[in-house]
Every structure is written in structure tokens, then in C-alpha cells.
Amino acid sequence: MRIAYPTVLFDSNLTDGRDMVRSFLTLAIGNTQGMEDVEFGKIYDFYLPPSFLRLQDSPSVNTMWRILDKGASNGGLAAGAMKPKLGMQPKPFRAASYALWQGGTYTTADLQGNQAPSRTSEGIPEVAKAMRSCAQGTDVAKRLSGGNRADEPNEMEARGKYVLSQFGPFSGNCVSLVAGYAAGGSAQHTFPKQFVHYHRAGQASTSSPQTQRGYSAFVHTKISQVLSSTSIHVDTMSSGKTQSESHGKSI
């Protein structure tokens, strides 16, 4: 079944006239036409006309990872995620980062936020020390994907600025990680020189085989590109309890 919307009715910014992806998400993904008439309404692909895409931003930095001296083609990266994913205290946080960087270049700390056991003001300086030590010891550039997601833009901006201030000359090695139900390019607009790593919102509720709504991992990659993401997290391994459908491996 195909569903169509006139893009001229999509919302646009007062400030610069750019179209909002939020309108597409609300209409095509959220309030799908004929919801009561369709038993299975998951979105597996979508098309936006060039006139709409021209009113979207493109990433301010490319995806070629030149800061890590990677080539412009065939440039995959293996990233290590710290466990436990949240609440890690500052010293273990530093030790885990150091250990991962000894054998790799890209570490993600997606859920390490400002929790009671590990305040951002205590954990981030420790991780910055670990990056400096690893970069000097291995003579290889390192990257950190640190979360600056928040409920409102001011908090997102404050988190991003704090992380960059702590890493100093290594700030270019930090990636803005936006996860959850985000529907806009706040991080990309606020920090145009940083990579934006965009996570799939609500893995199980959005693209699990159990849901009859939402969208596939393939659709998520396309939405993320429209949102100007430079790095996209889709979970296509199709294993575990919150992963995508088997055909996601085709990505």
C-alpha cells in the first residue's frame, strides 16, 4: 500500500524557511492515514521529492574520518561500546576507555550521562585524560562518541560545550551522539564541526518484528540522512531481544 502527502503542507522554519522533517515523521510515521483501515502499517521505504530535500541541511563534515587518517573509500570502523552502559563511576569509566582505545580507535559511551553514580563533571575529565594518554602512547588518533542528547536544546548545547571544553585540542575527535526520539538537527546546527552520530529511536518499539507500526532499519538510515547525520546507528545484526528484522542485514 502507498500513502501520499502533499509536501507543500509540511511545516517550515520561521527563521530560515527550511522544511521540517518533523512534519514527515508526524504524518507518515505517527498519524498514518487510514490507521484503522490498515492492519499492518509499518513503513519499509519512503520518497521525498528533490524540492523538499533541497530545503534540508547536509552534514557540515563528511564521513571519511580523515581525522583518523582513514581513506576516502572502504573506510569501515569497528567501535567498542562500554559495559555497563550507564552509571559507570569516573575511575572505571577512564579505565574502560583506555582499555578499548588500546586495541581500537572509536569508543562509544552512549548512555553515560549525568547519573548520580557518575556525574558528567567527574566522568568526562577522566575520559579526556585516557584519550590523551592513548594518543600519545599509541601514536594513533582516537575518537569518542559521547552522548549530548537531552529533552530540550539548551541542555543539549550545554552538554556538548562542556565535553568539547574538557577535550581541548582533542575536541575534533569527539562525536555528538544523539539518541532517542529526536526529530531535528539541533546538534548539527549547534556544533557544525563535529560528527553527529544518530541512534535509532526506541529500538524495540520502532522497528522490532513485534510492532505493526513504526519503520524498518532501512527507513531509519534514510531519515537520518535527511536529518544531516554523519554517522548512523541502525542495529542490523538481527540478534538479541531488541534488534531489527532479519532482512535488515541487506543494508
Image (cartoon, helix red, strand yellow):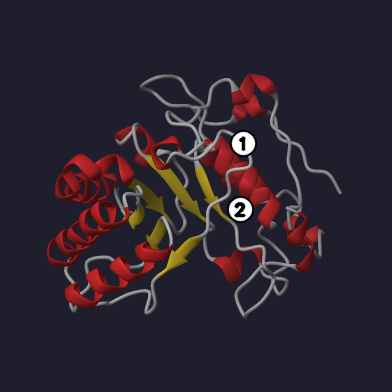
Q: CA distance from mark 2 to mark 1?
A: 36 Å
> 236 and 38: which one is in front?
236
> Which residue does the numbered mark 1 point to in the structure image?
73
Q: Residues within 10 Å of mark 2 (few under 14, many from 20)?
A: few
Q: Report which quarter residue 236 is drawn in.
A: bottom right
Q: Position of residue 92 (x, y in %)?
A: 23, 77
Q: Residue at x 24, y 52 (%)?
A: 136
> What amino acid type should be assigned to the residue bearing mark 1?
Ser
- Name above or below for residue 142 compared with residue 8: below
Q: Is residue 89 visible?
A: no
Q: Position of residue 202 (x, y in %)?
A: 53, 65
Q: Residue at x 27, y 77 (%)?
A: 87
> 15 and 78: which one is in front?
78
> Which residue does the numbered mark 2 point to in the structure image?
30
Give the number of marks: 2
Q: Position of residue 181 (x, y in %)?
A: 47, 56
Q: Residue at x 45, y 65 (%)?
A: 80
Q: Report which quarter residue 109 is drawn in.
A: bottom left
